[in-house]
Image: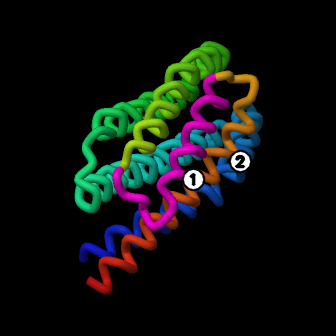
Amino acid sequence: MFADKYALAGWLAIASAIVVVPEIVAALILERLSHAYPGAKILVAALHVIGLLISVYVLYMFRSLLNERCNFHKADGLIAVLIGASLLFTLIGLMGIIPDWEDVISVVVLVLFVPFGAITAVFGYKLLKLGDDLFGLARPFAYTTMASGILGATVILMPIGLLAQLAALVIMGMIFLRAKEQAEFV
């Protein structure tokens, strides 16, 4: 059971890294189609909710891994804030369903990327203080997380930050899968 929960989190982290770009493209296409096809907004909302559920589960499991494996609790508050921010971004995204709010929602999301990026960068920095190397992946994960936060906070460099975030998700997935393997042998 211990190993299975990390396996699921690992595969979900990697899957989310793989599908995030097609998800963004699909959301943009569906948004453009929403005027002609009102049902397209429901599909966009479904994409937001599915992304939220995966994000919350993966972050929660990462906190669990840090707590159980490393007895590391210094990032618990930041992980809670990141989960809350994911919920906030999803709620704001769902408000985009309301006609004539798209422009306001876009501005609000861009403004929120600055503090969200800063929190993400601080989270990565905190992970540098981790006493465990997480199978040799703690530092690469911390640095890619900091890079995604810093680049995302600039808003202008957000696309490059997205690439760093994708790398961080894959590294996180690898951490989970290695934790699963270790748990199976113990």
Q: Is residue 107 visible?
A: yes
Which coloring applies here? rainbow
Vertical placement of 125 versus 166: above or below? above
Instruction: Compute the Cα span from label 2 to label 1.
Output: 30 Å
Look at the numbered disc 2 and give the secondary structure of its residue. Answer: helix
Q: Amino acid at mark 2?
A: Ala
Task: Kindly identify the amino acid type of the residue bearing the numbered disc 1.
Answer: Pro
Is 159 on the left or on the right of 43, as rendered?
A: right
Q: Position of residue 76 (x, y in %)?
A: 29, 40
From the viewer's perspective, tell me whether residue 109 is left or right of residue 136: right
Do the residues under discs 2 and 1 have CB atoms within 8 angstroms? no
Predominant SS of the magenta segment: helix
Which quadrant, please, contains the N terminus? bottom left
Query: Residue shown at 61%/13% (left/top)?
Result: 104
Which residue is denoted by mark 2 in the rendering? Answer: 26
Indicate which disc, 2 or 1, sits on the residue closer to the N terminus: 2
Q: Residue at x 40, y 69 (%)?
A: 8
Q: Looking at the image, is mark 2 or mark 1 nearer the viewer? A: 1
Q: Which quadrant holds residue 66?
A: bottom left
Q: Secondary structure at mark 1?
A: helix
* 150 magenta-colored: yes
The magenta segment is 131-153
| Label 2 crowd (10 A; few <14 / some 14-19 / many >=20) | some
34 left or right, relative to 125: right
Q: Position of residue 96 (x, y in %)?
A: 57, 26
Which residue is under mark 1?
A: 140
